[in-house]
Amino acid sequence: MNTKHPAIEMRGITKSFPGVKALKNVSFSAHCGEVHALAGENGAGKSTLMKILSGIYRPDGGSVVVNGEERHFTHPLAAIRAGIAVIYQEFSLLPERTVAQNIFLGREPTRRGLIDHKAMNDEARRALALFGSAHRIEPSTVVADLDVASQQLVEIAKAVSLEAKVIVMDEPTAALNEAECEVLFGLVDTLKKSGVAIVYITHRMPEITRLANRVTVLKDGEVAVRFDHVPEPEAIVRAMVGRDLGDFYAEPAAPQEIGDVVLSVHNAGNERLKNVSFELRAGEIVGFSGLQGAGRVALAQAIFGLSPFTEGEITLSGKPARFTSPREAIRAGVGLLPGDRKAEALVLMQSVVDNGMLTSRALSGLSGNANATPFVSAEAMEKLLRELDVRAGSFAQDIKALSGGNQQKAIVARWLALAPRLLIFIEPTRGIDVNAKAGIYHLMRDLARKGTAIMMVSSDLPEVLGVSDRVLVMRNGELVAAFSRGASEADVMLAATGEEAVAA
Amino acid sequence: MIQETVGSAKTRGVASIGRLPKINPVFFVLAALLVAITFSNPNFIEPTGYMNFLKRAAPLAILAAGQIYVIVSGGFDLSAGSLITLTVVGSSMLLDNSADATWWVIAVMYAVGLAVGVVNGLVVSYLRVPSLIATLGMMITLNGAAFMWSSGSPRGYLPETFRFFGRASIQGIPLIQFLPVALLVLLVVGFILFWLMHRTNLGRMLHALGDNPRAAQMSGVPIERVRIIAFVASSLSAVTAGILLGGFAGVSTDVGVGYELQAITACVIGGAQLLGGRGSVPASIAGALTLTAIFTLLNFIGLPKPTRDVVQGLILIAAVVLATYRRNRAGGT
């Protein structure tokens, strides 16, 4: 579409890390005034490619051409001076400084040797004005006081004020809500019109459809396919995954596979939950949908004894089950896989086996042999990890080296060793790539087939609808709707938001 | 931003760099130091030489083997040194020069140690006081208690029956000629603490607690109980060290001064992660021997005590820096 020479061009880039070939002969370019989407699963090489572009890594082979001129960046600063700005998922803002100070960090305007705060604030205001009046950020605000979306905008304003010709955005919507995403998309459009080349890294199809002019899909360090137009999302996903998605979700439960009531919650509540009543049966997967803060996670944590119910009648397989600590809930046969694996599930300095055995050991006598608990032995855990297809060089290596999907499977193994009656999954596939997602879905279904009741809390609506046998919807701490299989996204959203929001 | 970018590139690092070497470097350092000592004092390879060295190192080694429990669980126990003082002073007061009382006095001292550990653990677990502050308070309290108990003028000596553990040796053993009782105590205590830390569920719970307390709690680890046990292990090892030190040092209100920091230094030299989650009993004992060997070497060279303090401080910082460097190289946070 754009015939003049590209703003940046990467030719035949090759990069190896010890033991891994991260990039193989990858070529990639971005023209002024276009959005070039870079898609691919985790580990496909997207970030490595961008780190080479921004001078953090040096390629083993190939060249980087900026404005028709071959460049060898030896330092990120050199790339920034050449007009290449990268906005990473984790921000690099200083939280205790103001917006203006962050934007001009290291190049503050001075007057008679002192920092000219007025000029700095004015300049910052001009850069921020790009975002329109809807999202005005005051340059003198301390960054820590801004929400995540605004921080993202400050990052972009910084790139703009650097007069970047190329802006790389690495999954910029990861931390944004829907309204904030819209602001970002509008901004991308504006930047595009002003002639900036944008490299947009994402694996969310709607964003590609909405924003991109071209799409490049990386797989295993190679360019799997490049589209000079935006194709059907299926085509992109197929290229990312390398196979069809027909069996992405597992088959739902047949009626005869659903057994007795495992968990019964009647008129239960606490400070976050009101009058909640529902039942979970053996063999079924029940999805809990709702907006952020609707009480889904609070409900899971209440069942698990982390923030207990203060009222109501809860039974597990007929026995009273108002637990007041996770330990008590676990002893009774409840397991929970938290949404934030790193913060709430993993012990990163321990091995894969240690992580798998953590709960089995916790429930065994403290002076008992750590490698032979009454629940599982170290050998049996390794066997279980192999059955779950956890990929690791060795199960004795630290779990932090594993990918998100493999870490999640190791945590599943932790619970499987205890054969729980009820397993609660919170955001089971957050941060997990497409192939591994399918693996987790099938794993959940296999567990249900073996008679476990599964409660799934997820913000990913297609996932909730694709995986669950029933969907319960929460709003403001209450259960507001129940759907059997086959409900549409619109049905669930309507129930989750309430009428007034849908009308808007 | 530029600084940040460089920094984050480093910590994100490369996913697959090899694991840390299997053998803890502290053992090489210790071996090198022992060779150096032998060069500056050839008598060291005689049993009297190295046995006296091990005997002198035993209290610190025992203390470090207990301290590592608290460090792995994610805390510090600063009260260990003052508990040594209390043990020595308290024993001398209770014994009142009567040899017959030795056994029950020792029992009383272990009971005191148990109580100190439980209180430390309870305060940290339930009152949520950071362990550094909680045990600092305990340190001041115990030092004060030891001073009050003895009215500031402790009695001059302990009976031989009590000093047996720190002072006596078992004679007539082939090859090594004699075995100090203190070393025997170290071997027994060291083995028990090693076994608990590296072979039992308790040890894995301690590691999990120090690594990620929230994940530990959500995985069913009885975190309060495990933490209390860690402090108790440290306190009981301090009482043991106190009994040994009472054997070869005199009775005074400053026997234990500085021992808690030496023990922490020893653990760090042994590669312990300072905020919890990783640490080893044998490596901490090796760390204690290393520290003692450094002091011995400095002594041979003829450096005075203040210089030794300076060196100890520098070693502590260097060990932490080195550990951090190795961790970053290994590509993790």
Image: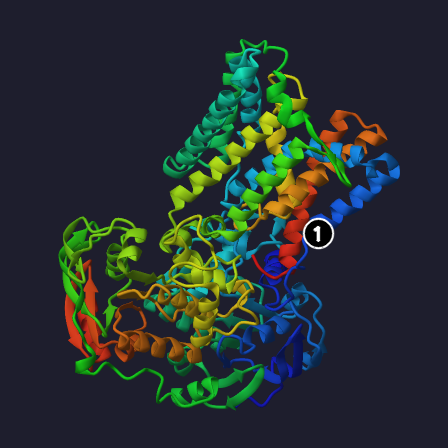
Percent x, y for residue B189?
57, 39
Task: Assign the C terminus of chain A to one quadrant of the image.
Answer: bottom left
Q: Nearer the viewer, residue B299 or B131?
A: B299
Q: Mark 1 falls within which chain? A: B
Q: Is mark 1 on a helix, strand or loop?
A: helix
Residue A465, above or below A363:
below
The count of marks equals 1
Percent x, y for residue A125?
47, 57
Q: Quadrant of residue B39?
A: top right
Residue B110 visible from this viewpoint: yes
Residue A134, above or below B26:
below
Q: In which quarter of the image is residue B287?
A: top right
Percent x, y for residue A304?
27, 56
Residue under label 1: B25
Q: How crowded is mark 1: few (under 14 residues within 10 Å), some or many (20 or more)?
A: few
| Residue B268 as seen in the image, left or right of residue A214 | right
The amino acid type, in three-letter code, at marker 1 is: Pro
Q: Quadrant of residue B184?
A: top right
